Image (cartoon, grey):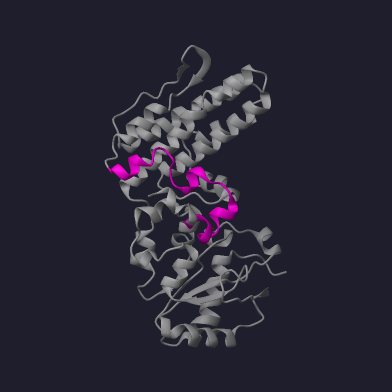
Amino acid sequence: MPEFVPAQELTAGFYADVIAPRLDRTAHAAGLLGWGSDVLGYDTARSTDHGWGPRLVILVDADEVEPVRKRVEAALPDEYRGVPVRFGWDTHQASHHITVATLGDWLRDHLGFDASQGISQRDWLVTPQQQLLGVVRGQVYADDGRLAPVREALAWYPDELWRWMLACQWSRIAQEEPFVQRTHEVGDELGSRVVTARLVRDVMRLALLQARTYAPYTKWLGTAFARLGHPDGLDRALADAVAAGNLADRERALVTAYELVARRHNALGITAELDTAPRPFFDRPALVLDAGRYVEACLATVSDPRLKGYGLIGSVDQFVDNTDVLSQSTAYRRLVEVYQ
């Protein structure tokens, strides 16, 4: 087995050595785009044990799709730098392959809509962040100008939508922060640990939202969170929370984490500054942030009546975690009727 090189690097060489010479003067864009660890730059030697290899999306004009496809297919070697080359022209046909398509067709297949023709609020709300990452994160090896505007448009949410999503994420924390103590109080230690883990994940996703960074699917959520960098110690506080063997340590670590993301919220400057100190949950022996205050503060900066009319559901990633939904545009687009 050849020495491992990341797919982004391998595909760059594959494009330059094998694909580019066959495109002549054909206007096109090409990149490692779509679903997968390799697109995110998270692949390792472990990734090579199934279906790993050079993978490329080539975007051309409609009348060039078939001619380019034939030229490229005729030129494909069985392997490149010791790695098998797989090809399948349908994006659902093979894990790793060469795709030739128009920009609009590829976007409709990957996202469920053609973002080059505009992005509606509904499109933003029902498109999983992992799918958005598949467009904006991957390496681009050539671009005649057709791809860059789409990547720029999809780079992050519109400001007011982002503020509403922050409110929705704070709401998830507000709904469950007292349950860590309450489950323990009735003898449900496992339940207390499960609620803690849920809250840790919600804080991680909140931190990514605050940093204007899309969250990848579950396997890489922790990696994306770690790469934010946490000089304030948020990562350590969350690790302490899930490792805690008793309620006191669990609650102490969670409250520390809440204070830290609350300070990050204040640093954003999008609302009036809020008190970050923990407090009791009514008369119960539970220490919380009272995250509902942050929900209200974020919502106060949202003027769009449509967003406010949805309640605190959030975007698709905030209320769905089923992989079969989040990975298939035909599945998650069915949720569009929620946002009417």
Give the residues in magenta: 304-333
Point out the residue furthest to the top here.
283
What predominant SS class does the magenta segment belong to?
A: helix
The location of residue 266, given as percent across then percent down, is 34, 32
Q: Is 87 in front, or is 144?
A: 87
Residue 85 vertical placement versus 34 (above, below) = below
> Would residue 204 be counted in the magenta stretch?
no
The location of residue 131, given as percent across then percent down, is 49, 58
Q: Is 123 in front, or is 59?
A: 123
Q: Quadrant of residue 143?
A: bottom left
The location of residue 229, given as percent across then percent down, is 48, 43
Residue under the image location 48 percent in, 39 percent down: 230
Residue under the image location 54 percent in, 87 percent down: 70
Picture quarter with the N terminus:
bottom right
Point out the residue furthest to the left here.
303
Q: Quadrant of residue 149?
A: bottom left
**Side of 96 relative to 67 (left or right):** right
Residue 326 vertical placement versus 319 (above, below) = below
Residue 188 vertical placement versus 51 (above, below) = above
Residue 94 vertical placement versus 40 (above, below) = below
Residue under the image location 56 percent in, 24 percent down: 179
The location of residue 227, given as percent across then percent down, is 51, 47
